[in-house]
Amino acid sequence: MKKESIITVVLFTFLISLGFKSFSQVEVSGVVRESSGVLPGVNIQLKGTAQGTVTDTNGLYKLTGVPSDGVLVFSFVGYATQEIQVGGRSTIDVTLIAEVTSLNEVVVVGYGVQKKSVVTSPISKVDSKDLAGFSVPRVDQMLQGQMAGVTIKSSSGQPGSGLNIFIRGVGTNGDNSPLIIIDGLVTNDGILSALNPADIQSVEVLKDGSAAAIYGARSANGVILITTKKAKDGKATFTYNGSYGIQQPWRTPKMLNSSEYVSLIQEKYANGGSPLPTNFPDQNSIQNNTNWMKAIFQSSATQSHQLSVSKGTDAGSFLASFSYYDQKGVIAPEKSNLKRITARVNSEQKINNFLSFGENLFVMHLEKNSIPENSEFGTPIADALVYDPTTAIYDKNAEYGFAQSPFVQKEYINPLSRIFISNRTDYQDEVTGNLYFKVTPIKNLVFKTDLGVDYSFYTGNGFSPSYHFTPAFFNTINDIYQYETKARRWQWENYATYSRSFGKHSAEATFGTTAQVRYDGTSFSGSSSGVQQEVQLNPNFWYITGTPDSLQRSASSSIEKKALQSFFGRINYNYDEKYLLTVSLRRDGSSQFGANYRYGLFPAGSVGWVISREKFWPQSAVTFAKLRASYGVNGNDRIGTLAYASTIERTGIYPFGKPGNQTIYNGLSSSYSANPNIRWEQSKQLDIGLEAGLWNDKLVVELDYYVKTTSGLLMASTVPDYIGTNAPTANVGEVVNKGWEIDAKYRTSLGPVKMQFKLSGATLNNKVTVVNADGYIDGYTWPIRNTVITRMEVGQPIGFFRGYKTNGIFKNTDDVFAYINSNGDPIQPKAKPGDLKFVDANHDGVIDSKDIVNIGKPWPDLTIGFNANFNYKQFDLRMLFAGSFGNQIYRSYERQDVPNNNYQRQWLDRWTPTNTNGKYPRLTTNDTNNNTRASDFYVESASYLRLRNIQLGYTLPTALMNKVNISQFRVYVSFDNLLTFTKYTGFDPEIGTSGWILDTGIDKGFYPQLRTVSFGANLSF
């Protein structure tokens, strides 16, 4: 009995001690260091709670009330997070290790991931932290300046406008858009305007032929891989990101005021020997001084709200997010705006060690109102560029109350009346998602089946009321336009990956299949006229069904079906992570092509040598060095449906019969001749690269040189005129792109200040080597003079500007008669002092069309990006610069043929008898010298350096946030496009294209980029 009592007491004491140990709390203190010293500002948090603190300037910390069996989490920007078991200790010193460098990070490749240090191709990566804090709604806008060799050009600053993405230049006169893949699903090109940037974990760009070749016939323009966020293991996390911003144009052209305008117009008519227009004012009778740029442009607001909740465990994960974005335009915010709502659910569930499954679902609704833009006439901006300042904005006796100029008419009207008659609304709905299963039947073998769907639904309508503004500009009956378009695609992929390491050998093999079907259909598109006058301004009646039945109503519909079937494989091998090899092969079959060339093979291979792992590599500052080379064949299948067959199209609608009893007949004709041998454009690319890490990867440099030849470009072939139909499309063109790329990253510290820098740069040499039998394809035609400005021609860059070169301005009569040919005759006999001096390019003694030469190009010689990040205690500062150098812009918006048009203020420095060194030619109504012909006078440098984003943030102290159970609370102020350094005098040097690649670099009066100041907050708990 005594023995049993002793045992009972011992057991009871042991159990009590366990309870005390489990629930006892300790005070923990210590110091946090890095390799070069103490580390201030480190976050220390008790795992699973909001309790925590930060280290002081000496790297010291103290945390009370810590369970003896708790876990402390140490984290700091640029360093790997560490979790340390307390184990009852009161002193815990920690040394943080620099975060995984870019050489050892994992990057996404086609159908898998690889460690960067063993990748044998150039792959650019941007992760979620690089996309935070921008006020712009689009992911591609946030990528500008962050990747070498990836050029992103804005086509407009209007809300909802598109962007152009070029990877390693332009390789075709057709569609240069890259392939976009989100979580393994090939999506439509417009998806980047729909995504919520906060959902994105990383963006990888496959730039060379070898990495992209795994996607075969769709990879010639490069591949963009977007991976969305998944929940991390641990407690449930709620995150909110919100911002509110004010926008305005970063710059608008400065126009002449009324006094200056009257003086220049008087001078213009005097020089031309013409009488002034009737009732044209003099300096004493000016009644108005309207600034039309101020009249149409104004400040506007933008707001963004993003909310997510996630929870992850060993058995699965779940993430749901919601976002709302609202942006008003800086011209007529009520008619130029964007609203977007998105929702996403990503989840994955592990059933057992054999089977797991998951899904990614994305839903979006977008509503956009827009005004006309990007045209030399027919837009508010074009009107504001020429409209005279002596005209008032409003006149209660005029049509709809808008005053119209008696001096500037032709195609132009009061810019505000243009806004009034412009009404367009577009809607976009997206449902994108995939469901996948992963099976691991044996060790190291994973099979994945993935079924994806991408559904897009576009609707919209436009309306223009009846009006009669001037004798030259009227619309006697109102007009309606309406459309509805559906596009859907499904994709089913099955592939298996087997990986194995044996000794120093490592290998991985991936083999799979893809089946894809795409339907593009316009279920309705039509127009009509005749909404009843008394309700024509009511938006509820802006639908075709609201118009009376008449011959004014028309409609059309179409549907296209495309299919793709593929087989692919890839093998990766490395020996001791020193000798690296990757080979891949894809076979695609596409319904876009005829039976003769329906299938194609796309092989690729790459090798790498990590020299720094050799025994002979000396101990030096260069701690990592890798040489690599790659070669790949890629295809571009972005062509029109049935281009290999002869098709019939409707040519028009023809009514026959007496009025009131007419019958409508449709005319039909052959669209173009068939070409059963048409095939995809093919790109062959060689890349040689060097990667180096210095001082334990504090500095990481990646350098590449590439040569990319794209052949078989699709363009109209040459046929005799008597054929009577359009020429068939054929594979006849070739373009070569060459260039250097550099990516450099550097991280360091200066006392308590941690710094990270990233520099990216790329050069480009673009040249057309083969075109059709004519030797050229004409591009953009300047409507002002009906002159071809851009062209695709052998030996020149795609879309180069063509025109006359100038050599200054004739200062006086002696200059005119001194410019003579070999016979002693004046080369420009009709010129007068103040006229442009045109270069006799072919030296035949006359100025004619044979002197038209290359006067500029839209493609930059050099693009750069520079990213700088600073952290000091609770403060963080980020700056992103982007620049483009060596390209030009053609100012097609500038009009001198419109009677009495206004001018930009630089025309004050024109030639006059008292200013013979003026930069601009004389003004005249009698242009005998043809000064307004297409020439380099209209060409300007488009080089610029822009501070695209600067952001200053402050994270509230953890100790303070612990009291309200908040994990992190950060506030910030952000500026977009705060500074721009450029010599360009137009709206914006950053000009994309309005659709066709040969329109690039033409400034038709672009909606300018916006300067935005935003205030935001990031909250998680």
Image (cartoon, rainbow, N blue to C red):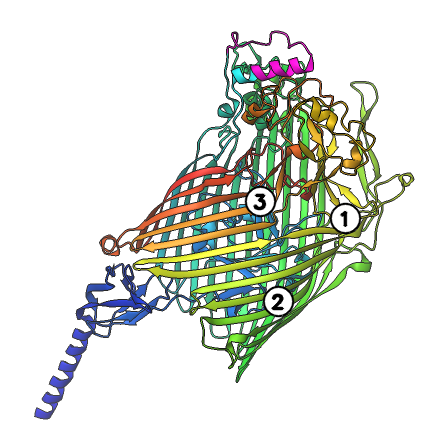
Q: Tell me if residue 266 is in the magenta stretch.
A: yes
Q: Which residue is mark 3?
A: 153
Tell me if residue 750 comes above or below residue 817 in the rendering. Answer: below
Residue type at mark 2? Asn
Q: Position of residue 265 (x, y in %)?
A: 61, 16
Residues at discs 3 and 2 in contact (Cβ within 8 Å): no
Q: Position of residue 652 (x, y in %)?
A: 79, 31
Query: In terms of depth relative to the viewer, which is nearer, 687 or 224?
Result: 687
Secondary structure under the numbered disc 2 in the rendered image: strand
Query: In terms of depth relative to the viewer, which is nearer, 993 or 386?
Result: 386
Q: Which residue is mark 1?
A: 794
Residue type at mark 1? Val
Callout in the foreground (2, 1): 1
Q: Earlier in the sequence, mark 3 or mark 2?
A: 3
Q: Position of residue 645 (x, y in %)?
A: 82, 49
Q: In the image, is 931 to the left or to the right of 284?
A: right
Q: Rounded to the nearest whole Å, what is the CA distance between mark 2 and mark 1?
A: 44 Å
Tell me if residue 381 comes above or below residue 212 in the rendering. Answer: above
Residue type at mark 3? Lys
Q: Quadrant of residue 799?
A: top right
Q: Which residue is mark 2?
A: 494
